[in-house]
Amino acid sequence: MVAVVVCALGQATPPGALGAEVAHACSSLSQVASRRHWFWGSSFDRQALNDAAFVQLVKTHASVLVPENALKWTVVNPVPGIRDLSDFTAIEQRFGPSGMRFRGHPLVWHEQLPEWLETATPETLREHLRQHITWLVGVHRGRIHSWDVVNEPLAHDGQGLRASLWLNALGPDYIAEALRWARAADPDAQLVINDYGLEGDDPVSLLKRQSLLQLVRELQSQGAPLDAIGLQAHLHASAHGPTFHSLAAFLAELRGLGLKIVVTELDVNDQDLLDTVAGRDQRIAEIYRDFLMVLLAEPAVEGIMQWGLSDRYSWLNHEKPRRDHTPQRPLPFDRDLQPKAAFEAICAVLALPKVVERSTQ
Ligand code: G3I
């Protein structure tokens, strides 16, 4: 007997249909999410610290922050012997007093590495990694409750592990070792493997899921401490995609392996949408709704982090610009910090009155 949780609000409900009523009921995304026992969070970059209106928006709607760049290796240890936590400290000082919680991102990644590290021998590289994790996790012990220990370890084409500096120099054991060092530095922190391209029904995502499941099984057979999987969820909009028909079964597999699930970087890239602004916003809202409806039905999901809350600071504007040079509209609030159809869609899903269980056979 397979039990499927189905939300009371069906897929047919168009985003925006509940309009002002839902927006009013949803004066804080994190508050309405907490009724679902979810957190709602955001990334935050130091460059936005002096933007009082944006800071207020983040305080209103997020209960968890992740520094977008402030804990990356090139920022915290740009040259040997120099350790610089000033960017994260500034963010923590601004938001910590109001009760904000923090995720850490990322301990091991193939990007944003300082040049000096890339010329290290395999033996010294391993020792640098051990020291980096031990220091960064240890110094934030009790203040960062969840870490992206290994970020993007899977190959871009979905086939096995990424041929990164780490894999090439240290072999696949670098993942288990990183997890063990992180656990030793803060036994209470949640340890996460975080990756992108796992959400949709496209062939690469299906392949990547299998690579992830194989990695998890290998780590578990070695007794490596892994608590959760992070789905980055940088969703890419098209007129009819992405779709999420196979996502529920994948999430259930992760749960079956004893793992929690965190959505770590949710946004919707509308680089390829050729429509009016209103049409684009509507399509983006539908994608948020369809994705969150699947997540809501999965008990292993702990919460959602967005990669920013407002289009004002989205990475997509500089990394994935639109061909018509108009700004991307990936997040629930526009560049003027006004809510869009995506916000209403998120609210509508989070504010669903109840879930009902239905048997499929
Ligand atoms: O801080 C320097 C600044 O001093 C300099 O003047 C400026 C000139 O370009 O660059 C600034 O650094 C940039 C940094 O963002 C802060 O704005 C880097 O060049 C730029 O590469 C960096 O991009 C970040 C990117 O990761 C690479 O680290 C994006 O902001 C950030 O959103 C993005 O986040 C990643 C996640 O970590 C992992 N998942 C994918 C996600 C999106 O790519």
Image (cartoon, helix red, strand yellow):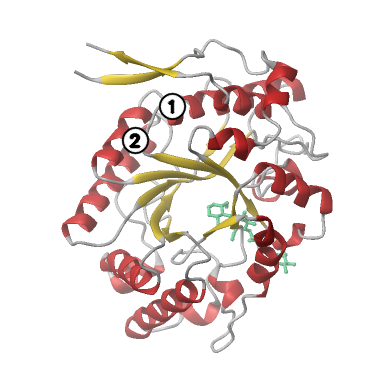
Q: Earlier in the sequence, mark 1 or mark 2?
A: 2
- Quadrant (top left, top right, bottom left, bottom right) of the C terminus: top left
Amino acid on which disc 2 is placed: Leu
Using the image as rendered, state which of residue 82 and residue 343 is in the foreground.
343
Q: In which quarter of the image is residue 119?
A: bottom left
Residue 153 is left or right of residue 307, and the answer is left
Q: In which quarter of the image is residue 89?
A: bottom right
Instruction: From the top left corner, tell me how far across and down residue 283 is, in percent.
Output: 63, 22
Instruction: From the top left corner, tell me how far across and down residue 144 is, in percent.
Output: 51, 63
Amino acid on which disc 1 is placed: Val
Residue 52 drawn above or below residue 78 = above
1 and 2 marks in contact (CB < 8 Å): yes
Q: Distance between the residues labelled 1 and 2?
A: 9 Å
Instruction: From the top left corner, tell me how far across and down residue 342 is, in percent.
Output: 66, 28
Residue under circle 2?
Answer: 251
Mark 2 Cβ and ligand 1 under 8 Å apart: no
- The secondary structure type at the circle numbered 1 is helix
Using the image as rendered, state which of residue 176 and residue 125 is in the foreground.
176
Residue occupying the point 53% across, 66% down? 143
Q: How many marks?
A: 2
Res 294 label: 1
Mark 1 Cβ and ligand 1 under 8 Å apart: no
Using the image as rendered, state which of residue 41 and residue 124 is in the foreground.
41
Label 2 CA crowd tier, 10 Å (few <14, some 14–19, many 20+): many
- The secondary structure type at the circle numbered 2 is helix
Which quadrant of the render holds ligand 1?
bottom right
